[in-house]
Image: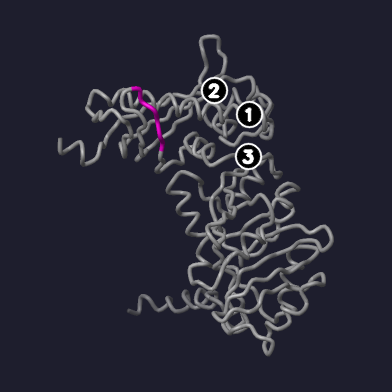
Amino acid sequence: MKRFWFLPLFLLPILLMLTGCANDDVGIAQRAVVQRFGIDWDEEKGFAVSMYIITPDKLSPAGGGGGGGGGGEESGQPESDKPESNGKDKLISYGKTLYDAIKNFENVLQLKPYFSHAEALVIGDSVSKESLNLITDIFDRNNDFRPSLSIFCTNGKASDIVLLGDDKPSASDRAETVAQLGNDNAQMSSTFLYKVIDLLRDGAQDLFIPVLSTEKHGKQDILVVNGTALFRGDKLVDYISPEETRNLLFAKDLVSHADVVIENEELGLVSLSTTKSQTKITAELDENNKLFFKVKIDSALSVEEIVNTKGVVLHENHYQGIQDAYNKQIEEQVSALIHKMIFEYDVDTIGFSNLLWAQKPKVWKSITGGDVKKREWLQEVPIYVECHSKVTDVGLAAQKR
């Protein structure tokens, strides 16, 4: 044991550096736990930060929350609905900067917003059309915001999404639940804060961010995934539909599951589940040393339903026809989306520039001149999409025959 006499001296400095939360002297009673928040731009009041929060104690006129309900009309003052009995509240705070808006929230309500457990940030189109660079600096400097914070856009006000909710316990989890369903159905791909900041810094590949909107179901408004926002650098270019989003995810090798309906001459309509998919993009040179890209998609298919009036049942000799119809449909749709993004929007959302740099750096440099933000050259390069599929599951009905 005498041989290890130096261990306490070695460990003491390390233990002293493990401060944990010692620097944070704000108690839980003085916190407002932010579940989701949004950012809009108001021409008169500046940045508008909307928050759906949970407070340890019910907000009331007797406590800190009373100031929020009464001063909402003045710039810098949070706006609040009637405080809820379950300790949840919905507020908007204004400021010249995001930091200013958050501080105004603190000063009026005497509560410190706690963002570490926020499930989502929603960006309104008043910000995304102007520049994402207007809002990213605070996230880069402040460790209160999780790098894995989910980012969404909306075609309208972020506050309409963030402040949506009722007194049901599930209301605060709705954004996270909708996001998971969107991932499962190939309607969206999760976009995180660190990814947005990294892509904006790099500039070689353009951003895409899932879009949330509201739909009326009876008397209740619910959140839905409604396509994807495409960016050119830091500015919003346009929105694409949920179906186009699925094709984007196929191209980017981000499909874990997708539902596709194809039409077969003999069987009629066939509902298919893509149970597995893999996409590989390669940069190649033809016999004339001209560059082209090949997008190869391989999918495993499960037959979920066949709809026809002829009473035709599925046999193995139908498999090839199903696969051919699926391949043709995916090839046409993915090709159309790639063409639209390159020629209409002038964006490189797929990341062709990065792929060329990684696979053929000399060709990349000769074409781009080393400019990672250059996009025009993509319009001169052929891009071929190939899809190969195989029916791997036909369900229990076929097994019983």
**N-terminal of the two: label 3 or label 2?**
3
Contact flag, marks 2 and 1 (Cβ < 8 Å):
yes
Mark 2 residue type = Ile
Mark 1 residue type = Ile
Where, by quadrant of the figure, is residue 373 drawn?
top right
Gap in angstroms between the C-alphas marked 1 and 3: 11 Å
Q: Residues within 10 Å of mark 2 (few under 14, many from 20)?
A: some
SS for tag 1? helix
Residue at figure coordinates x 70%, y 64% from the top left:
49
Identify the magenta region.
260-265
Residue at figure coordinates x 54%, y 79% from the top left:
86
Q: Which mark is residue 342?
A: 1
Q: How far across and how far down the image is residue 149, in percent?
A: 56, 59
Question: Which residue in the protein does label 2 denote?
Answer: 383
- Residue 215 lies, with reference to residue 62, above or below; the image says above
Q: Residues within 10 Å of mark 1 (few under 14, many from 20)?
A: some
Q: How far across and how far down the image is residue 266, in percent?
A: 31, 23
Question: Which residue in the protein does label 3 denote?
Answer: 206
Q: How far across and how far down the image is residue 297, in percent?
A: 42, 30
Q: Is residue 264 within the magenta segment?
A: yes
Gap in angstroms between the C-alphas marked 3 and 2: 18 Å
